[in-house]
């Protein structure tokens, strides 16, 4: 399950990056290079901006939810204590005062 969320999280991150780069800002940017700034686009003059903004908002929400999901999953994992947990630990023997060489 966590692998599925991690893959979905990475795809959402890449989608947000792509959509942010496609949007046009104040100057000539990536969006103008791909033609999203033209009036004759598929969504019309202002339709592409609102579509890209909404798609970015949706993918940002998906990214946020998957981030919370990954955090929840990682904080609630059961850790294995190992195979030696049932073996009793013997205390270390301290050397006697006469056994220490000078």
Image (spheres, rainbow, N blue to C red):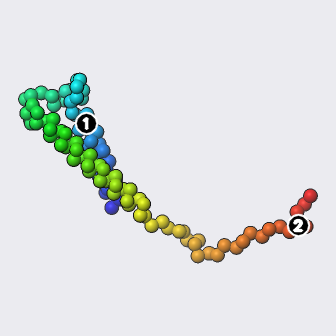
Q: Is residue 67 left or right of residue 80?
A: left
Question: Mark 2 or mark 1: which comes first in sequence?
Answer: 1
What residue is rendered at 15% in x and 40% in y? 51
Q: Assess disc 2: are there few (<14), some (14-19) or many (≥20) residues with their C-alpha within 10 Å of its C-alpha.
A: few
Question: On the rendered image, what quadrant is the C terminus found in?
Answer: bottom right
Crowding around mark 1 (Cα neighbors within 10 Å: few <14, some 14 to 19, many 20+) is some
**Quadrant housing the N terminus:** bottom left
Location of residue 35 by image quarter: top left
Name the residue tied to disc 2.
97
Q: Residue 39 placed where, x, y %?
A: 9, 28
Residue 31 drawn at (x, y percent): 21, 30
Q: Which structural element holds mark 1?
A: helix
* Residue drawn at 22 percent across, 29 percent down: 25
Residue 36 shows up from this direction: yes
Badge 2 vs badge 1, beta-carbon distance below 8 Å: no
Q: Residue at x 21, y 30 (%)?
A: 24
State how many labels appear.
2
* Residue lying at 29% horizontally and 42% vertically, measured from the top left: 14
Left/right placement of residue 69 relative to residue 87 reads left
Helix, strand or loop at label 2? It is loop
> Would you name the residue on which mark 1 appears?
20
């Amino acid at each position: 399950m966590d692998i599925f969320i991690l893959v979905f999280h990475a795809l959402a991150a890449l989608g947000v990056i792509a959509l942010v780069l496609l949007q046009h800002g104040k100057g000539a940017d990536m969006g103008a290079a791909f033609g999203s700034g033209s009036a004759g686009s598929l969504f019309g003059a202002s339709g592409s901006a609102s579509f890209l903004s909404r798609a970015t908002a949706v993918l940002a929400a998906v990214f946020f939810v998957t981030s919370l999901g990954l955090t929840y999953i990682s904080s609630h994992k059961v850790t294995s204590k190992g195979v030696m947990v049932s073996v009793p630990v013997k205390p270390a023997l301290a050397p006697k005062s006469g056994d220490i060489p000078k």
